Image (tube, rainbow, N blue to C red):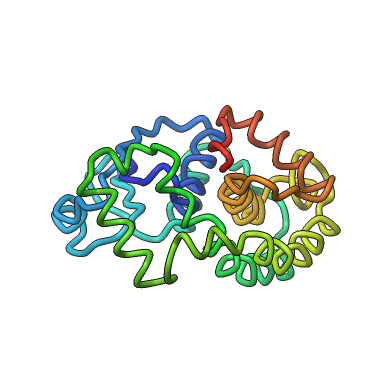
Amino acid sequence: MKLYMFEHCSLCFRVRMTAALTRAHLQEVVVLDDDTETMVALVGKRQIPILVKDDGQPMLESMEMVKYMDRLGASVLTGVEKPAIAALEDQITPKAARLTQPRYLLLGLPEFGNIAALDHYQVRKRKALGDLVELRANTRRYIDELMPDLEAIDRLIESPQAVNGTLSLDDVRVLPIMRSLAVVKGLRFPQRLRDYFETMMTRIGHQPLPAI
């Protein structure tokens, strides 16, 4: 299988962590941010992630990719899901974007491997979020607005090894967004959430992105 991805992409990381947990062979292909041509050639539109299965058929929805990979062998995502986790993910995602997306372009990531790709990202994100420098300047306010949601997730974590005690799709919801938020220097996860993040990242063999 081949995953077309951005290094910073949390939806891509859902698939990458599942590959690690299931020990599936996954070839990762980082696409430049301005390489719309490759995406269109694969699936007819601009979208990331794209999973190309061994039979050559592409998949577009990240959670369907996760479920597909988990079914290839002995399933590892066998635990129950909690509606509260999915609800908190929905609440956190737009708040996280204001903190994380203005920072990714400063990390030297491969999807920004040339000036055109970096400029393309900046234009896209300015249209979606506003001035990126101003967003970074408001970091403390955005952290304060986010913390109640992180504390709510912290209270729900049952084990450093799995959000609900046994690995489930909720882990695929929580870990990628925590990996994204870890790029925000000065943001401290609550204790159980921090223990979970560090334990799971070690388990799947991935290093956190730099914090800035």
Which image quadrant: the C terminus? Answer: top right
Q: Position of residue 199 (x, y in %)?
A: 72, 34
Residue 143 falls left or right of residue 102: right
Residue at (53, 37) in percent of width and height: 209
Identity of the residue drawn at 82% across and 58% down: 156
- Residues 122 and 42: in front is 122
**In the figure, residue 91 lies in which quadrant?**
bottom right
Image coords of residue 43 (percent x, y): 21, 59
Residue 134, x across and y down, in percent: 50, 65
**Image point 19% across, 50% down: which residue?**
35
Quarter of the picture containing the N terminus is top left
Residue sitting at x 49%, y 46%: 13
Please give the count of numbered marks on the rendered protein.
0
Q: Give the percent coordinates (x, y) of residue 41.
A: 13, 54
Image vertical order of residue 43 relative to residue 111, above or below: below
Q: In the image, is 139 to the left or to the right of 100? A: right
